[in-house]
Amino acid sequence: MGKDNDAFYQSANGWYKELSKIVNHLRVGIWSYDVIEKKVLYVSKGIEYIYGVNKEVFFNNSDLWKKFIHHDDQSVVEDRQAKLWSGENLLHEYRIVRPNGDIVWVVDETIPILNEHNELVQLVGIIQDNTRQKLIQKKLQETVNYDEVTGAPNRKELQKYFAHIIQKNKQKTLVLNIDLDGFKRINNSLGHMIGDEVLRVAAQRIQHVTGKNGVFFRLESDEFLVVLTTKNLSYEKLLQQIIQEFERPITIGTEEIFLTVSMGICFYPKDGETFDTIMYHVNAALRQAKSYGKNNYQIYTPEMNDESYRLLSIEKDLHYAIEKNELFMVYQPRLALPMNRIVGAEALIRWRHPKWGIVSPAEFISIAEQGNMIDDISTFVFRSVCTQLKRWQQDGYDVKTISLNLSAKNFLNEGLTETIGKIIEDTGVSPQFIEIEITESSILSAETVVKRELEKLKEMGFRIALDDFGTGYSSISYLRRYPIDTLKIDRTFIRDLEKNERDLTIVKNIINLAQDLGMTVVAEGIETVKQYDLIRLNGCNEVQGYLFSKPVMDLKMTNFLEEKVMLSTKNEKDITDERKHKRVILHLPLKAILRKPSLQKSEEIAEVLVENISVKGLKFISPLHLETDVLYTLETNLCGKTITLSGTIVWSENVGFDIYKYGVQFQLSEKDQKLLNSLLKTLKHLVTQSPKSVEGWFIDTNAFSFLKRQYKNKNKQ
């Protein structure tokens, strides 16, 4: 028996030593503390990396760790310790200050150990350095929330700032909306580079006048907003000074540019007690100023135009819109890349008002929220969408996802999940086909409640999408804390994608981040072929936008579902060509070796990526600027066969950021055409039925990064 015990202890001791070696190589601090004896039992080597001191000092002074806490975080950290005495784990984040003055963000998790009497006897913890992640998050946040041209905070920051004003007090505050008259003309005639310089100078002049009392924001292209407290402020004098600032020309290089400004003014809380109301009224004042010939300012009054009456009419009539059958749904197709296969749609509500015509939800949803009508409207939306989806499925259409929007107010309704569950039961639709979209502002308005309700909906089988991603205050943290399936990139990043490399970098990183987390990424607001190409090249999963279709009625959506695949409505030449020659759109980019034949030998130029192919030609992309009307050969492997195709580049297009698209017209013998035709029939069948089974030189990495790498490698040679 004694020998067995000795063997056991020797084995355990050896195991403990091996474990200690591993633990001491980790860059995390692991520790243990005896609460009864008030002494430190164990500290791992990693604590030295985090605190910058020898681990032995913690054995000599068990309270030493408290002295490292940043003075701004000390009270909060100490208050949280009370959780441990009730047996609750404590996971929190705070700053420490090393002896050399370095500030380090740490994530600290402490686990309490209780005895049989539920008394706290021991604490075990792990602490790790989180500084790098904090810096990355801060940098991304600055990129998202600040205007690149002027450096001013954007609309999202304005919303947060105004929420702070409302929460803090009811102090009289002036809100000034400034528009640069005729700025679009400058952009169109002199170009965006000079336009950006004009914006920078204009921003500096306005800030020079408003001074430290004013908080300056850039809302959009040529529109700025300033928030000022009006204590001891002569705002009439200030407004005249702004107008005078623009009497001097703005000089950019050899260009002298003359601008005027139109301004709208309103006051908080006199003209409204919410952000949306204040913005509505200050915009009404700005419109009035522009209608008076520009270069002036107007102070908001309720009688300024008919909008006030229209607003009251909409609010009153909205109460009866459902029972009068005035509300209806439209659908915007969602397409899976790269095949442009229709996989579903986003459902959007519209209101056919008997007097005002079609009213946008942007107008009436906020009214519905304020008037406690939003639950009835959301119920109407949910039931309409489920009924239509069931009809499509019964008719044999393959609809994988219909997404719809829920308001922040819906989540405050305790009966939300019960109402939705009843609709699902009544219509017989499986929740897996419904995707519920929430915006970041919805989360901010009631974070705890929204999280709880989303988890319930997720358990019921619904998919959850985060809409307008990238514009919120803590977008990245939402991905970790909420059950998100789909990320919808905000259209503000898509809008300038062709000319703003910074936006492209953000979009690319959002796509990579979301896909690494197992999420589907949807790009909204695709309006041009170049936007579509850049999104597709960077591996986005789905797209939607006016390039393919505006939101349409259910009958038109049914016609789209019959077609299964959608092509751009703005590139008719390509559509006709693809239909005429039965072009096969490849499910993944196909690598090919491009060569230029010469008298002596074929000169290899580069690896390119083929997007689609027919018996008449193919389309490929490359970072190289190639000659047209020159004979090239392309070697690739398709369906397990190595093939060489000869042809001439007949057209080219710069899709942006030094990536070119080329169209090749084949020059093949009749025999080679027949062989290629046979191969393409096989390929088309496989791509349609089982794309993953297609053999060939396909790449599953980011096409944009692949091409840039090829360009760099070529330059090194």
Image (tube, grey):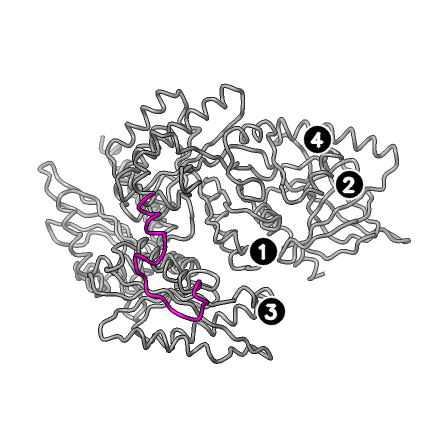
Range shown magenta: 290-313
Q: Is there a contact, CB below 8 Å, between mark 4 and mark 2?
A: no
Q: How far apart are marks 2 and 3 (CA)?
A: 40 Å
User: Which residue, given by chain and number where applicable, does mark 2 sit on?
Assistant: 617
Quarter of image, res 486: top left
Q: Is residue 563 left or right of residue 20?
A: right
Q: Does the magenta stretch include residue 292?
A: yes
For badge 3, the amino acid type reads: Leu
In the picture, the disc for residue 498 is: 1
Mark 4 neighbour class, 10 Å CA radius: few under 14, some 14 to 19, many 20 or more: many
Q: Where is residue 218 in the image (x, y as percent from the top left)?
A: 42, 64
Mark 3 neighbour class, 10 Å CA radius: few under 14, some 14 to 19, many 20 or more: few
Q: Of circles 3 and 4, which is in front? A: 3
Query: Of the residues under marks 3 and 4, which one precedes in the sequence?
Result: 3
Q: Of circles 4 and 2, which is in front? A: 2
Query: Of the residues under marks 4 and 2, which one precedes in the sequence?
Result: 2
Q: At 44% across and 40% down in the image, what residue appears? A: 357
User: Which residue, given by chain and number where applicable, does mark 3 sit on?
Assistant: 190
Q: At 44% across and 62% down in the image, what residue appears? A: 291
